[in-house]
Structure formats: structure tokens, C-alpha cells
Image (cartoon, grey):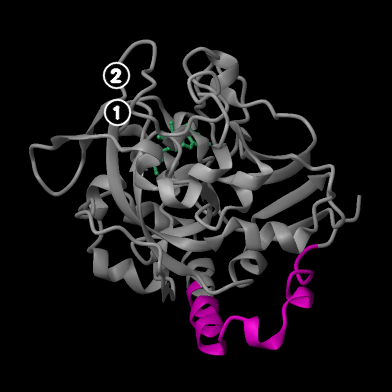
Amino acid sequence: MLIRIGGSLEGKVGSSEITPKETFLNRRNFLTGVAALGVGTLALKQVPGLLHPDAVHADTKLTTVASKYTVPDAQTPFAKATTYNNYYEFGTDKSEPAKNAHTLRTRPWTVQVSGLVKKPQTIDIDTIMKYRPIESRVYRHRCVEAWSMVIPWDGYSLGEFISAMEPLPSAKFVQFISASDNKNMPDKPGGYDWPYSEGLRMDEAMNPLCLLTFGCYGEVLPNQNGAPIRVVSPWKYGFKNGKAIVKIVFTDKQPRTLWNEISSNEYGFYSNVNPTVDHPRWSQAHERRIDSSPFPKTVPTQMFNGYVDQVASMYAGMDLKKNF
Ligand code: MTE
């Protein structure tokens, strides 16, 4: 396999497509700042009250551009989106990732691209981040456990990254493998076949809605939300969106996914948000919307999480009760 650290993505873009210098410099400053301050600063940010938020804001801020992908729903406050998380490597209780994920070192970080692809390579995260302007997109975020949030995510379409890697025509699926080393994640619970693994069909991964995500709320992703790189496919249940990705593998077969292996009748490969297909243990017709209210309301769940126009055609002719 060809191993190249950095550089290769730049060679693939025309000058008009390169991230504007100002964006790049701001991001460089941010990265230098993070490196100089060390991971401790990011860790402090995750403990509410220890440090005034403005004190770290300059070091974590991303330069983003507006996006056409947005929803009018009221946004979930940053404090809730970053303290109520699913990230089992850092604990199975929703409050645990915010307390424990400070052990994750997000620099240096590389992503290995392999499998059925013309350009297998290992790429530095900072090269990936500056390949395209980072858009701020407001998406509905629906968990399979029937709660939901509305989050401004920052990233660019995964399809743009995939195209640069030049997958072979035989590549039908793409697998995302998360970090799982003991140094970064010393207290991973037993009973799970780590690393966390998820996958998408190739056309799903190429759908422009599917976001390669580096930040949220205009800031670099907090560790508990998947730093330094995660996927967000907003028409699917949240567990399809692997956090802290270290490997992207192009395959001709449906890849293993952690939750599907644990319980295939509960967590299907597709996992499209579908109010007419219940989880065996609860209804999926409604969701508890976590917003700024102290008393979250229950709202009806929408087909494909409200993204029918953008994604329904990919499933034309498929039995969605069977392929749940
Ligand atoms: N990725 C990893 N590596 N480990 C996890 O436990 N949980 C998934 C997904 N990605 C998970 C993961 C689940 S179940 C959900 S609902 C979303 O992350 C939660 O994302 P959030 O915490 O940013 O809301």
C-alpha cells in the first residue's frame, strides 16, 4: 500500500477550489494555538465551569461558510449537545463521554484510506480539513433511542473526499472504523467488539447531505462529539455516524457494523429514520426533542428524518421494512 502523509489532496484541486488563504491562515492559527496549549486546554473546555468559555473560544473556533443545507427547527443548545452523548468507548451513560473523553489525543491524527480504491493513502487530519471550505449545516440528529437534537455541524460533503480517493468501480460500500487504542480510551467497557465500525452503501456515502464533520457550533468538535473527524448522515439514526475515525475502507461487501453484530434484529445496516418501522422494544413514531426547554416536547418523527426529497430516490423499490 502506498503511504503518504499529507499533500496528496492539494494536488487534486484546482486553484479556484482551494480554501481561501484567510480561511487557511485562521485554521493554521487555531491549530498552532491548540498545539501550543496542548490537549489540556481542550479537556478543560469540556468541564463546565472550570474555564470561562470565551477563554478557549479563540483556540477552538473554525472558519466556516454558510450552507444551503439547513433546517428551520430551533437548535439544541451547545451545552446540551456536548453533555448528553452516546460514545460507549468513554462510558455507557450519556453524561460520561463529556467527563471522560479528555483522554483522547486528537493530534497528531491520520486517517488511513484503503481497500478498493485507486489512491490508498494515509492522510493527516489537517490536510483533510483544508481540502474544502468548511460549511456550517444545521441538521436534525435523530438517535435510535427516540430522542433528537438540532445541531449546526461543520464540515464538507463526504462525497468530495471520496471522489479525491478515486474508488474503483467494484467498491460498493464504505466502512468507517473508529479509534480504539487503550492509551486514548483506557476504560472502554468490555462486551463490545471494538473498534466501533459503521458503513454506508456507496451511493449513500456520495449523497451530498452526508457530511465529513470536523466541528459543531462553529468550533472544532469537542472530543465527546467525535473529534477530530466523524461522519454525519442526517437521514439515518445517529449510530450510523462513527466518531474519531481512523480508517476508511472501500469494499465490495456490506461491512461489519458494531451494533448490527450485537443485535441484528434491532439495528439494521440501513437504519434510515422511519416512523413506520418500530424498534422491537419501542416505537419510532415519535421523538423527544432536546432543545432549550427544560421540558423537552415529544414531536412526530418524519420519514428519513425530514430529508425525503434528498434521499428517498436511493431506496426506490426497496422494502424498507425488510431493509430497515
Ligand atoms: N461512534 C463511536 N466511535 N462510538 C459510539 O459509541 N455512538 C453512536 C454515534 N457514533 C458512537 C459513535 C450513537 S449511538 C449516536 S446516537 C451518535 O454517535 C451520538 O452522537 P452525539 O453524541 O454527537 O450526539
Q: Which residues are magenta?
A: 5-30
On screen, residue 90 versus residue 32, left or right, reads left
Dot placed on the residue nearer the N-terminal end, 1 or 2: 1
Q: Is residue 266 magenta?
A: no
Per the image, label 2 sits on a secondary structure element best described as loop
Residue 221, x across and y down, in percent: 43, 56
Residue 25, x across and y down, in percent: 54, 84
CB of mark 1 within 8 Å of CB of mark 2?
A: yes
Label total for image: 2
- Furthest residue to the front? 317
Tell which tag, 1 or 2, sits nearer the viewer.
2
Rendered residue at 74%/64% (across/down): 164
Task: Name the residue tied to disc 1.
Answer: 146
* Vertical arrangement, residue 191 with respect to residue 138, above or below: above
Callout 1 crowding tier (Cα within 10 Å): few <14, some 14–19, many ≥20: some
Asked if the residue at label 1 sits under 8 Å from ligand 1, the reply is no
- Which label sits on residue 283? 2
On screen, residue 61 versus residue 179, left or right, reads left
